[in-house]
Image (cartoon, rainbow, N blue to C red):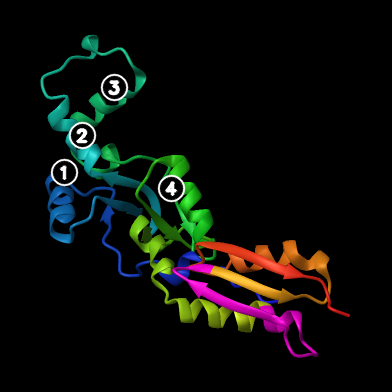
Amino acid sequence: MHDTQHTVSDVMTRTVVAVSRDAPYKEIAKTLSEWKVSAVPVLAGEGRVIGVVSEADLLSKEEYKGREQADLTRPEQLADLAKASARTAQDLMSTPAITVHADATVAEAARIMARKGVKRLPVVDAEGMLAGIVSRADLLKVYLRSDEDIAREVRDEVVARLFAHRRPTVDVQVDEGVVTLSGHLPDETMVPLVARLVRAVGGVVNVDLRLGGPTS
């Protein structure tokens, strides 16, 4: 059975704007504005991702202007105060960078974003070199697939392989991303497996199983 899950490589943006660790504050601000992005990876050497600078990092300079260390009590405030006096990406960036690999599933990337509270992730290869970037909007691209496209993949990659040597007795219908399977399986104990495989298909919102065992 082939794995039908969509991966980060299917949806990521491969042309990425990034800055060097020595990039000055104003250059970073200009880059974010010109490319209309909220954060950029910071690279060292030949392209290894060492951190990320976001709009929030840059805004620390304005937020903490004129404030003294004695006025602050929380550790995160002290870190932001340090960024307020930063001049380059090296001192502004959040590090280590929260990244993801291209072969991670879309679901895995979504979980990382939710857990870490970030809107985008640099995509890196095995050596930590920048390969692309994936955003929340990118992860939602799989839900733009048509019902017909989803139904075709479910029939070809799931149902057909369950009935490799006989005519399928399962009907597939998709409406607004909800997959309905009705009919009979060669073995009723396969129902949980079928559900898991169908949910793994990109663009599937939910699964409605109306399946039974063999009729004879």
- Mark closer to the observer (1, 4): 4
Residue at the limit of the structure toward the right, as seen here:
216
* Marks 1 and 3, how far apart at CA: 20 Å
Determine crowd level at label 2: few under 14, some 14-19, many 20+ residues with C-alpha closer than 10 A.
some
- Return the residue at label 4: 113
Residue 166 lies in the magenta stretch: yes
Q: Do the residues labelled 2 and 4 touch (CB within 8 Å)?
A: no
The label number, if any, that marks residue 25 in the structure image: 1
- Return the residue at label 3: 77
Q: What residue type is labelled 4?
A: Met
- Picture layout, residue 153 above or below residue 15: below
| Residue at 73% from the left image edge and 61% from the top image edge | 192
The label number, if any, that marks residue 134 in the structure image: none
Q: Are marks 1 and 4 in contact (CB under 8 Å)?
A: no
Sequence-first disc among 1 and 4:
1
Helix, strand or loop at label 2? It is loop
Sequence-first disc among 3 and 4:
3
Sequence-first disc among 2 and 4:
2
- Return the residue at label 2: 86
Q: Are marks 2 and 1 in contact (CB under 8 Å)?
A: yes
| Residue at 20% from the left image edge and 32% from the top image edge | 60
- Picture layout, residue 60 above or below residue 205: above
Near-viewer residue (47 or 182): 182
Q: What residue type is labelled 2?
A: Ala
Q: What range of the chain is rendered magenta?
A: 159-178
Q: In which quarter of the image is the N terminus?
A: bottom right
Q: Which amino acid does label 1 sit on?
A: Tyr
Helix, strand or loop at label 3? It is helix
